[in-house]
Structure formats: structure tokens, C-alpha cells
Amino acid sequence: MPERPDIGLAEDVRSASTTETPHSPGIFAEAPAEVQADAGAPPVGLAAGSVEGSTKRRLGPAFWLAVAWITVVILAAILASVLPLKSPTSTIARPSLGPGRHFLLGTDDIGRDMLARVVYGARVSIIVGFTSIAIGLMVGGTLGIIAGYYRGRVGSLIMSVMDMMLAFPTLVLALGIITFLGQSLRNVVIALGIISVAPIARIIRASTLTFSEREFVTAARSLGARNFRIITREILPNVALPTAAFALVAVAVAIVAEGGLAFLGLSVKAPTASWGGMINEGRSQLQRHAQVSLIPAAVMFLTVLAFNFVGDSLRAYFDVREGSL
């Protein structure tokens, strides 16, 4: 029989497909390290999201600078009575002196030490800011969680009252409360605490509405957990973090509000130092001795800016989106 050339060709093809040469790796040969690294890398979109998330969660030096300023202000307010400061209420030098060696920030319109008055004024602002917002968190936070968890008529009634409080001009409400109760630090705290109830209640209600529909709350209900346990063990810890970030911003707002009331003469009584009162005292000398008003205004500006920046940074840092869970 004549030899079939196609058989030999098929054998050559089979031998070529199964024979490996030193310079040509087979199908199952190990890939180079560069190829393995590319194969094990996440998709481009995931890598970009990870980079964006790591950048977003970086606080940065500006955050720590703001924290340092807040720490200095709080420590100065706490330790004002033991620091080597001159009397904040006694006239000890010529009025309206500029900053110098003996008086680092100068003197005010009647010769009192500006540095001592700024430090003691920080005590008033810090007390009002933190205490009033603590009142708002206790009252408004409780009402917001109840309204967001139970909803229905209870939630509608609570939020109707909160909307009425928000619709009323805050400055007029504060003036009315202080006029009725009397002018004192305690009454300023009460007035600003009442004003802060409504916005805090709305913020916490919105967070409660979000977390009350999550799977872990549904699982707790299905296991027979009581409402009080669900609120305290499941919802409250999740609501606390964004609320704490918002509370720092609210402290800054309360400090500004106290300064406005002091500028109008409705905060602490003279000669007790307060930043708003110091700004008001130097108002008549803005053209000749602007530093009397500008120094306390600058300290208040930096403090409020630091609280706002820290609050916004913490909110962005601890923000966990549903898509990344």
C-alpha cells in the first residue's frame, strides 16, 4: 500500500504540540512573577476606590493643629485661676495699651490686662458651649431616638413640636428666655440648651430612621429583644458616633451664640470677662485702638474654626457607606 502522507503530518503536529523546548514554556508552565502580580491585583475600579478611601480617612496635620488649639483653650480655661495671670477685673495700667513686654496682649479700654481677660473669657465660652450642647443631647437625643424608632403618632407629635421650635427665631427665643429667667451664666446655658434641642433631635431622628431598618435590628426583633434593649444595644451605639461629630460643630455654634448675647449685654454680668463682652467694650475705639476688639474676636474665630474643622473631619473619617460594607 502507498504511504499516506497525512498520517505523518498529523504525528508531527501532535509531537510539536506536546514537546516543550527550553525556550518556549508549555501551556501549564509557571507564569512570570510580573504576570502573577498583575493577576493577583484587584480590578482598577476597586484599587481606585481603596486609594480614595485611604485618602479620605487620613486626618492630616491641619486636624491635629486644630485639636492642639482646642486643647490649649480648654486647659487655659480650666487652669485660669492657677496660671500666672494678672487680675482680669482690676485696672492696673494705662487704657488701650498695645501688646508689649509687660502686657502680652495689651490692655483694654479701662486698663485691664487683655491676656487675663481672654483666658477667663475662654472659661465662659467653654462652659456655655459644652454644657448647653450636653443639655441638647440629653433632651433632643432622647426625643429624636423615640421619634425615629417608634414613628407613628408619637414620632409625628414630637417632630411637630421640634418644627415649631425651629420655626421660631432663635435669637428672639434666647432673648425671651434670658429676660424671663434673668441675666446669669446659668440662664445663658439653659437658653442655648433649649435652642439646641430641636436641631439635635432632627439629626438623631434621621440617623435612627436609617439604623432601625438595618439587618441587625431586624434580627434582634426576630430573636424577641425588647424595644429598650434594641434602642440601647443596637441603635444608640451606631447613632452616637455621627452625633458626637455633629456635637462639636454645635459647640462652635453655641460659642458664637454666647458671644452674640454677650455683645448685646445679655450674657454674664460685668466685670466678668467674656469674649463677646470684650468685643462690645472695644467697639467705641475701633478707629484708634482696634486691637481691643480684634484680639478677642480673633481668639473666638480661631476657636470656632477649630471646632468646626475637627467636627467635619471626624464625620468624614468615621463615615461608613453602605456600598463599602
Image (cartoon, grey):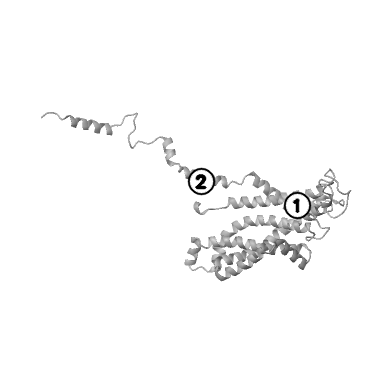
Kindly identify which residue carries mark 1. Answer: 76
Quadrant of the rendering where the N terminus is positioned? top left
Label 2's element? helix
Tell me: 245 left or right of 83. Answer: left
Q: CA distance from mark 2 to mark 1?
A: 43 Å
For mark 2, does the 10 Å Cα neighbourhood hold few (<14), some (14 to 19), or many (20 or more) residues?
few
Coordinates of residue 272 in the picture (x, y in percent): 81, 58
Q: How many marks?
A: 2
- Please tell me which residue lies in front, 125 or 301: 301
- Please tell me which residue lies in front, 30 or 192: 192
Residue type, label 1? Ala
Coordinates of residue 63 in the picture (x, y in percent): 65, 47
Label 1's element? helix
Coordinates of residue 182 in the picture (x, y in percent): 78, 66
Q: Nearer the viewer, mark 2 or mark 1?
A: 2
Residue drawn at the location 72% of the way across and 50% of the way down:
301
Residue drawn at the location 77% of the way across and 62% of the way down:
185
Q: Earlier in the sequence, mark 2 or mark 1?
A: 2
- Please tell me which residue lies in front, 281 or 71: 281
Residue 312 in view of the camera: yes
* Tag of residue 119: none
